[in-house]
Amino acid sequence: MNEVRIDKWLWATRIFKTRTIATDACKLGRVTIGGMNVKPSRLVKPGDVIAVRKPPVTYTFEVLAVLNNRVGAKLVPNYLRNITTRDQLELLEMVKIDGFINRQKGLGRPTKKDGREMKEFTDEAFFGFDDDFDWDDDDNPLWTAEDEAQLEHHTPPQEGS
């Protein structure tokens, strides 16, 4: 076995999570050999250089050996050599850093920091009152005996006056 389908090789070497995703990437023109887009059925052999575009980075791999079945992550270096250029790797690092710093608000689940800020916003100290205050308590300092007396002597307004 000196040749194998490119979609199968991309899946077997763990470049893509599933063979279907590898096939779709080939169909969408994200996989090239020698600058030419390839179909999923294209056969690869040792020595081929494959470029895989996973935006925003284009990874480049040299095929060292072919295989039909998926292998463990520790065995992958036996079948390919990553020859991605330094500028592409630096671009990847910049995107990773930028993703944390400039995360657009409103996308995805809130982060832990967002959760803490929301809790702080609804915190009792922020509003200046205690939610556990018992309004029916007889020892309520906001309701005095004078207030009670005014309530007893208060007469509602007469209708038609």
Image (cartoon, grey):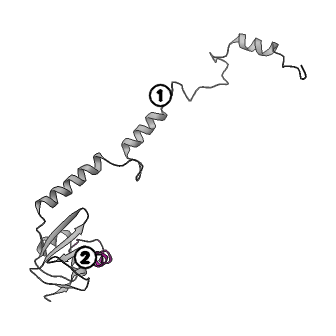
- Residue at which label 2 appears: 11
Rendering coords of residue 28 (x, y %):
30, 75
In-image side of 161 versus 94 (left or right): right
The label number, if any, that marks residue 37 in the structure image = none
Rendering coords of residue 158 (x, y %):
88, 20
Rendering coords of residue 42 (x, y %):
21, 85
* Residue 99 belongs to the span the image colors magenta: no
**Which quarter of the picture shows residue 72?**
bottom left
In-image side of 112 versus 161 (left or right): left
Work out whether residue 94 or residue 16 is closer to the camera in this orientation and state it: 94
In magenta, the rendered stretch is 11-29
- Residue at which label 1 appears: 126
Q: Is residue 42 above or below residue 129?
A: below
In-image side of 37 versus 65 (left or right): right
Name the residue furthest top: 146
User: Which secondary structure, mark 1?
Assistant: helix
